[in-house]
Image: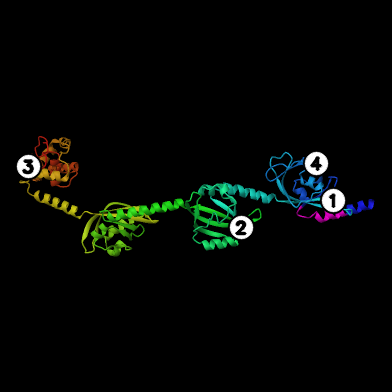
Amino acid sequence: MAEQNALRGLLHHQLQLIVSGLRDGVILIEPDQTLTWANQAALRMHGVERVEDLGATVSEYRARFELRYRNKHRLPAGEYPMERVVAGEVFDEVTVEVAPAGAPDPQWTHHIRSLVLNDAAGMPDCLVLIIDDQSERYDAEQRFERTFSANPAPAIILRLSDLRYIKVNRGFLEMTGYGEDQVIGRSGLEIDVLENAARRELAVERLREGRTIPQMEATLQLPDGGEKLVLVAGQPIEVGNTDCMLFTFADLTARQQAHQSLRHSEERFAKAFRLVATPTVVALRDDCSFLSVNEAFVRESGYPETELIGRRPDDLSLWDNEAERLALEQQIKLTGSVRNHEMGLRTRNGNVLDCLVSADTVDIAGQDCVLLTVQDITERKRTEQEIVAAIEEVMKDTSWFTNVVLDKLAHLRRPGSSVAAPVEEIDALPARAKEVLALVCKGLDDVAIAARLGVARNTVRNHMASLYRRAQVRSRSALIVWARERGFFGEASGPKKLRRAG
C-alpha cells in the first residue's frame, strides 16, 4: 500500500510538472473533494496567488466563488463543474461566468472541461478540471453587442454558413419598419439586401467568398410592400467564432427627395429664366464666362445663343468700355453683387445700348455663378437728354416762356403727381433771395437783376449760388422748374397755388 501511495504521489508530481506551464488552467481534485493543486494559469483565472485561496475543498470553493450561466442565472448547489466531476461526470465544455462571492458583476468567463484519471482497478484516482479563460473574447463580444445595438446606423449580420440573419440593430428596424422577429432567422433570399444593387454580381461573388463588399446603391423591400433606396456595404466579421457578413446601410430617401426637389426647382428656374422679359445671363463668377442666356438677352444683343455660351464678354467685346468691364468683373469676384452699374452693351451689329447692369451670386449645380440682368435705358437717357437740351435752349430767351409751359415741365419731373410740392421751402427763403428768384423766374439775367434790385452783380451771384444749393440744382432752368413745382411764379409777395397741369 505504501508503495502504491508513493507511486501515486510520483505520478501526481509528474503530472503537475507537465501541466504547470500550460496556458490552460488546471486544477487537481481528489476523490474525497480535496483541492490538491492548481497551476499558475488557474490561480490567475481566479485572481488568487495560492491554491489555498481557492479553498481546501469543493464546498469551500463554492463558498468563495459565485458561478453563473451566460444567462446570468446562478449555478445551484450540485451544478458547479467541480461537483459534477467529483460525481464522476465527464463533460467536454461548460461555459460559466465567475466572480468572487459577493461581487456584483462577473470578472471572468471560463470554458471548463473535465478529465477523470482512473487507477489500475478502474477507480477514479485523480479528477482534473481544465479551464480556458475566454474573458477577453466575451468582453469584446459584449462591447460589440452594445455598440452594434446602440449604433444609430442601420446594420444587420448574416451568417455565411447558411445565409441567415443572426443579429439586427434598432437602426435597421426603424429604417425598414421590420420587427426583430421578422428578421432574425430569416434567409438572405427572403430579405435581399442586395436587390437591384448597382453591381449585384460582384456583391454576390464577394458574399460567397466572405470578402468585403464595396459600397453600392440597392433597393430594400419593406414589409408594407414599399421600397427604400439605400447605400449598402458588407464587411466580413466573426461572431462567436462564426464567419459572418456585417451589412451597413445609409438611407438615401432624403437624398433622393432632395434631388427630385432640386430638379423641380431647377426646371422652374429654367422656365422663369427663359421667359423673363429683362435680358438676363448666368455666368461663372470666376471669369464671367456665359453658362446660359435668356431669349431677351439674345434679342437685345443680336447674338445667337450658340455664339454666347462658353464665351467671355471680352471675347466678344460686349461691353463698350474696357475699364468699366474690368471694374464690373472685379466687383463681381470680390463681392458677388452689383447694383445698377451703368454700362454700354455693344450689340452684334455694332450699336451700343445704354444699360444698367445688376448681379447677384447664385449656386447652380454646385457651381459658383452670378445672375446678371441688363436693363436697356437707351430711350430713357435719350429722352432726358432731349428735355434738358430743350430747356437749355428755350431758357436763352424766356420772354415767351409761359407759365403753362413751366407748369407742364414741373409736372414732367414728377410724373403721376398733380399736387404742388410744399410751399414752406419758398416761405423759408430770405426776402432778398426770394426777390432774386422772382426775377430769375421772369427770365432776367444776373446783370438785369442787379440793376433792378440796385445791388452789385456779385451779390446776385451769391444769392444764385445759395438758391442752387437749396434747390439742389445746377442750372437756371432747373431752378425755375423747382420754383414752379412749389407754386412760385415770380411774385415776390409769396407763392401761389400751383394749377393742375393739363
Task: Name the amino acid, label 1.
Answer: Cys
**Magenta-drawn stretch contains 19:** yes
Tag 3 near tag 1, CB within 8 Å: no
Cα–Cα span, label 2 and label 3: 116 Å
Q: Is residue 397 left or right of residue 360?
A: left
Q: Sequence order check: which comes first, mark 2 or mark 4? A: 4
Q: What residue does disc 2 label?
A: 160
Q: Earlier in the sequence, mark 4 or mark 3?
A: 4
The crowding category of the residue bearing disc 1, from other C-alpha atoms within 10 Å (few below 14, some 14 to 19, many at least 20), is: some
Q: Secondary structure at mark 4?
A: helix
Q: Distance from label 3 to label 1 (Cα)?
A: 146 Å
Query: What residue lies at 61% left-to-right and 50% top-to-bottom?
Result: 144
Marks 4, 3: nearer the viewer: 4
Q: Which residue is mark 1?
A: 126
- Characterize the local packing of mark 2: few (<14), some (14-19) or many (20 or more) Cα atoms within 10 angstroms: some
Could you say which quadrant of the image residue 18 lies in?
bottom right
Q: Residues within 10 Å of mark 3 (few under 14, many from 20)?
A: few
Is 282 left, or right, of 79 in this rendering?
left
Identify the residue shown where x is 86% and y is 51%. Answer: 125
From the viewer's perspective, is residue 456 above or below residue 251? Answer: above
Q: Are marks 1 and 4 in contact (CB under 8 Å)?
A: no
